[in-house]
Image (cartoon, rainbow, N blue to C red):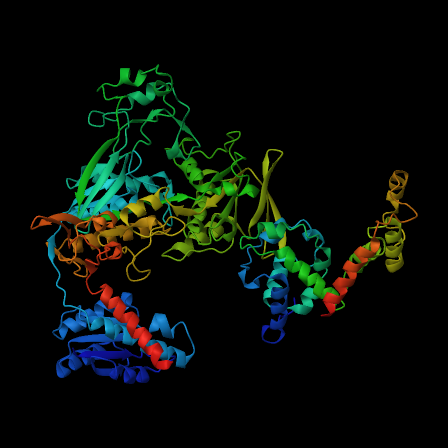
Amino acid sequence: MKIGVFVCHCGSNIAGTVDVVQVAEAAKSMPEVAFAKDTMYACSEPGQQGIIDAIKEMGLDGAVVASCTPRMHGSTFMRTVARAGLNPYMFEMANIREHVSWIGKDKVANTRKAIDLVRMAVAKLAQNKPLYSQSFSINKRVMIIGGGVAGIQAALDCADGGLQVVLVEKTTTIGGKMAKLDKTFPTVDCSSCILGPRMVDVAQHPNITLHASAEVDEVFGYVGNYQVEVRKKATYVNWKTCTGCGACMEKCPSKKSKDPFNELIGTTTAINIPFPQAIPKRASIDRDSCIKFKTGKCGICAKVCPTKAIDYDQQDEMITEEVGAIIAATGFDLMDWHVYGQYGAGRYPDVITSLQYERMLSASGPTGGHIKRPSDKKEPKTIVFIQCVGSRDKSVGRPYCTGFCCMYTAKQAILTKDHIPDSESYVFYMDIRAPGKMYDEFTRRAMEEYGAKYIRGRVSMVYPQDGKMIVRGVDTLAGAQVEVEADLVVLAVGAEGAAGSAQLAEKLRISYDSYGFFMEGHPKLKPVETNTAGVYLAGCAQGPKDIPSSVAQGSAAAAKVLSLFSKDQLQSDPQVSKVDLKRCVGCMKCAITCPFGAIKETEVRGEIKAQVIETICQGCGICTSTCRQGAIQLQNFTDNQILAEVNALLSSETEEA
Amino acid sequence: MNVIALSHSQDRDFIAQVEKESGQNVSLCYQCGNCTAGCPYTFVYDIPVHQMMRLLQAGQKEALLSCRSVWLCATCQSCTTRCPNNIDVAHIVDVLRHMARREGYSTEYGVKSFVDSFLESVEKNGRAFEMGLLLRFIGKTGRFWTDVDLAPKILPKGKLSPLPHKVKNPEAIAKIFERFRQECQK
């Protein structure tokens, strides 16, 4: 075998702390190496051409590129090798940047380690076999999990692009957090007026199937061919016959039920439609509040329902949806602000969250759009907004900036002045973060035109005194403590990944961070992809973002799905496990350990053998380490190849000794 | 206000020394001001605590060691409790007070004298001897009338004994002081 070794300078990234010329020189004496050279930027156009020319001129059978991580350019060089006429799997990468030059300054030691890594890559490549992909067909349906504004946008874009869309929403209506907002920044236009028509479009689109009050239970399969088990949670109302007339709500005697849509500042009936524009406009029963469920007596809603839709015996229903791609758009929840004992931790009724305030501002909210403080229902005249409650605060485990609170606080200060002209708003802030079109102008307007008093500093405590909430904070610009006697305190609570996002991530086999946000494939270049093929992200599920960004990401995820589905067949990764039939004893331990269900039992000449389904196998290698016979091997990562790498490493050590 | 000549007056060794003695990373402070917002002694401070942190980040040794605030801090730790970045601010102020003392500052002479009188009394008797402490404090400061109005309340309760009530083995306590002085010299 004739192997070529190409050692990349990466400008000064590698050459600064590794003697690349010496590495190339050392490679020349390695077994099977017929050609070795250093190159300034291996990934550049002339760099790749150099590799192609060398392969053709020297008649090489394989190439080792010593440069960066294969995550960065592994696929780049595989294509280069393929352009030179070789099988793309006759290629190995030695990572001498992330694993060598970036982590150590000792040039002699670095060079030695780089030579070792190249020697190992050469030893492995010598045993590589050409591999060939298989084609498999794809199911051109897409599932979108989460019916907030990001999920709605993704659903409409996919459906308009001709795809069949399955939209799964946890609550009984789509709309998400945006449906709870009164107005939106920086235009102060009505939130439900711009979102409502989009929600109706979802309901009426012939390509969209909507499952509200439903959650993803299990996910099987792989890109192009997912099977998703969806649990349709019992609503105790037959939604096929319910017309959303609301007669049940009028008569329901349990009028003091918790109202999660109104962030618990108002009450609703046990059987309810969350808000007038709900999609689907269908009633559902809150079991915990319903008298019929608690005592067995009542049943008034069943009596008044004109279509006899009430069904107290309804059970959760499991359905299986087959789709080719999934977009996770599960959004955010407010962090648990009860950790802030100094702001009352929920004990003071007149200290509320920004989302609760939003419901108060909304004309369809529990106060009919009148700002009334919860304790005595009086109109507040002095309102204090405290920003960064659960943002940029390591002491409560929330070091990140939620990013949109500065803007909605400015909006709420403006709306407060509109609602109560003789009111005064104070905003305690640390820094105003308003990058975006017309954003900074908007926060300035809150101060200049609406007279909101911005105080740079945090608040140390809030306590009640003589019917007021005393807010003690600091004005760091004046260098003094300040105190405000407030009627109402609004906390700009930060965002975290929606409840249950970690569990969903595990079902989807995608990564998530400690705050419940899903990890994108690459922080810059793959913002809507995940590391699982066929699973995409949109909206706040990926990280806190405002409405325009959520909508943009919804469209971006839809574009990714449309481009994935533009082909009729996908190519499988051939770097998968393979069974040596002579060695396999048919114990099927591999099938038990396989996390993807990629191994099935088969019979060969009357004997049980394991067989790998190549399109399902993800090449993780668990079967290889399970098999006692060494019969199932991950191709191009065989036991023998790994031993060859270890031997190559040891041979260099014995040389030095 | 004076110009802080950052190019000339930043004392990086001073920052490093404070960080070493307090075990805190001064760079973590992002000036939210929550320490000052909660501080119950700001009303007597010449420099509020968040500005002390800022001056520390700027390496302003003279301004910090000569200020009154380091002596007036009661170490109630409100600042430490409220800090969103988990900086032990009270510990830093404590370190600054020790440094000020080592470098011969006594901007709040009364506070320094009281602390000294208290410790001298404990070293001698193994516990505080109030009358002795009082006389030492008056001797150092000449403040004869300080808190004299409390005497009629305290005297009948036997809190101002003319003779010290020593602990059983005051030498053991004195050894602690001795060990502290030896450690300081190292």
Residue A436 drawn at (x, y percent): 37, 57
Task: Identify the image quadrant of the C terminus of chain A.
Answer: bottom left
Q: Is residue A436 left or right of residue A241?
A: right
Q: Residue at x 71, y 63 (%)?
A: B98
For residue B114, say whether it is visible.
no
Position of residue B99 relative to residue A142, above or below, is below
Query: Which image quarter: residue B139?
Result: bottom right
Position of residue A423 relative to residue A57, above or below, is above
Q: Residue at x 79, y 59 (%)?
A: B175
Position of residue A554 relative to residue A3, above or below, is above
Task: Identify the image quadrant of the N terminus of chain A.
Answer: bottom left
Residue A111 drawn at (x, y percent): 36, 80
Residue A75 drawn at (x, y percent): 22, 67
Camera-side residue of A349 and A634:
A634
Residue A643 drawn at (x, y percent): 27, 68
Camera-side residue of A361 and A343:
A343
Q: Is residue A297 left or right of residue B47?
A: left
